[in-house]
Image (spheres, rainbow, N blue to C red):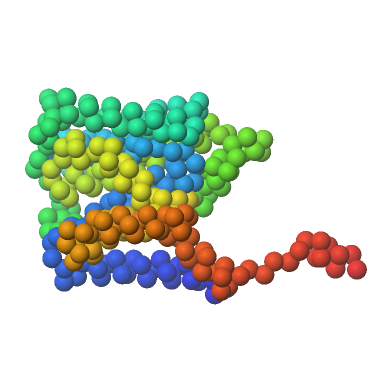
Amino acid sequence: MMRGWVRPLLIIGLIVLAMLAPIGQGNYIIYVLTSWLIFSIAAMGLNLTLGYAGQISLAQASFMAIGAYTTAILTLAGWHWVLAMPLGLVLCFIVGLVLGYPALRVKGHFLAFVTLAFNTLVFLVLRNEEWLTGGTYGLVGMPRPDFGLFATMKQIHFYYFTLGVTVLSGLVMWGIVRSPWGRAFKALRENQIRAESLGVDTKRLTLLAFAIGSTYGGLAGSLITPLVQFIEPGSFALAHSLRILLMVVVGGAGFFFGPFLGAGVVILLPEFLRFTQDYYLIVYSALVIVMLVFVPAGLIGIWGKVRDRFWPKQQIRGDIKEGARLK
């Protein structure tokens, strides 16, 4: 019973801590915290595709680009963010569904190359189609959403707006991974042939894993647009897809809270290491390498090792229970 209360209390505590974090901070720190929330959403989507369904993708930044540019173009044309954002999500869902079809035929590093090529394709389209995207000059001046009684022009107000969106998207993801779909995704990751033998429609699940994960990337892109109020193709190049992949791996692929921890390491940790001056990137890289070597399951894996070390589960052998019942 106590263990059942621990997780809800921990979640509530983390939300309260996130609400208190920006108080008294400058605009730059609040901007960094907002970036952490946004990239946590993108990492949540990749975690569903990679961590739960076992389908590798190097194209999450391209879906952030689709969501960002769709929202930017429509808001610059006079649309409200609330109306522009859903269109970006629908577009990301459709494109993610199409991108999932190669996953039905290729696996592993072959699938990684396919998604890498797609990320490069989106980057080239954004750079060359200047009539729509502004090319290398990008788009600038996208307005932040105004809800009448609550405007998000101030940095701290936009942070709380982003926090609300993050909590809602996290609740939706929690429902997905705890639903029969979530269990089917895990079965697909562990053994596709066994999952098919149990009646799981692996083709549909593969497509849904890409589509839902891509939609989360689009949501992150829709939030990046009003945050920075300037986007250009370089902001969504392959390097950013690799950063999101690093967030999932460092936090713990296949764990719900992994993306939040991983995004914290990738986004927040370099800021804490600024005191090392010119050496902060070296220290940061060394810490990440050491962690991946000794804790390949990610930061969540550290808690698992501590729990198993100090609070091991008592296992009762099935044959002993059966023997006791027969007696």
Residue 294 left/right relative to 246 = right
Residue 278, horizontal then vertical, whole percent: 17, 58
Foreground: 79 or 125? 125
Q: Above or below — where is 10 with respect to 126?
A: below
Residue 252, horizontal then vertical, whole percent: 44, 54
- Residue 39 visible in the current orientation: yes
> Residue drawn 40% across and 58% down?
291
Foreground: 228 or 308? 308
**Quarter placement of the N terminus:** bottom right
Residue 200 left/right relative to 286 = right
Residue 223 left/right relative to 179 = left
Q: Residue furthest right?
A: 327
Q: Above or below — where is 128 with respect to 217?
A: above
Q: Above or below — where is 114 with respect to 165?
A: above
- Residue 257 visible in the current orientation: no
Residue 177, horizontal then vertical, whole percent: 49, 50
- Please give the count of numbered marks on the rendered protein: 0
> Residue drawn 49% across and 32% down?
107
> Residue drawn 40% across and 37% down?
57
**Quarter placement of the C terminus:** bottom right
**Which quadrant of the view contains residue 95?**
top left
